[in-house]
Image (cartoon, rainbow, N blue to C red):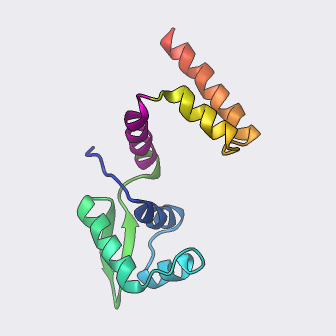
Amino acid sequence: MNTISLSDGEWKLMNLLWDENPRTIANMVNALRDDTAWTKATINIMLNRLSEKGAVRIEAGGRTKLFYPILGREDAVKQEASSTLEKIRTGGIGLLISTMTAEGSLSDEDIDELIGILKEGRKHND
């Protein structure tokens, strides 16, 4: 699969589509009203860009267009994680995790999950 890089705004739209699809532009404007001041035109431009990237499928649905995700959430997260790790490789994964922990970005549940993932990873490396 080709790597599809998503901007922060594109992540917002993709999360909406992953949570519920198909969606219309009007539906997305309403869903993002409290979070952004994006107009229909802005969202339309972003959705067309996502379509060109191969992340979204646009389908004519009568008078309105319907939008579906092509890129899966899990694939997007894996690509983003890989890209982020590549960018911060010089600082190390330890610095990333310690920063997230120190800033309170990780809940106790997140930490327990991370410990489980690391233990499982160790089993696969032995």
Q: Position of residue 95 (x, y in %)?
A: 55, 30
Q: Position of residue 2 (x, y in %)?
A: 25, 46
Which residue is located at x 31 percent, y 65 percent? 50
Which residue is located at x 41 percent, y 29 percent? 89
Q: Is residue 109 visible?
A: yes
Q: Position of residue 49 (x, y in %)?
A: 28, 68
Q: Which residues are magenta?
A: 76-90
Q: Is residue 42 left or right of residue 117?
A: left
In the displayed structure, 51 sits above or below 2; it is: below
Check if residue 18 falls in the magenta segment: no
Which residue is located at x 37 percent, y 54 percent? 71
Q: Residue furthest top?
A: 126
In the displayed structure, 17 sits above or below 5; it is: below
Q: Residue furthest right?
A: 108
- Which one is nearer the viewer's eye here, 110 or 21? 110
Q: Is residue 100 left or right of residue 52?
A: right
Q: Position of residue 85 (x, y in %)?
A: 43, 35
- Which one is nearer the viewer's eye here, 85 or 47? 85
Q: Is residue 72 left or right of residue 100?
A: left
Q: Magenta-highlighted stretch: main secondary structure?
A: helix
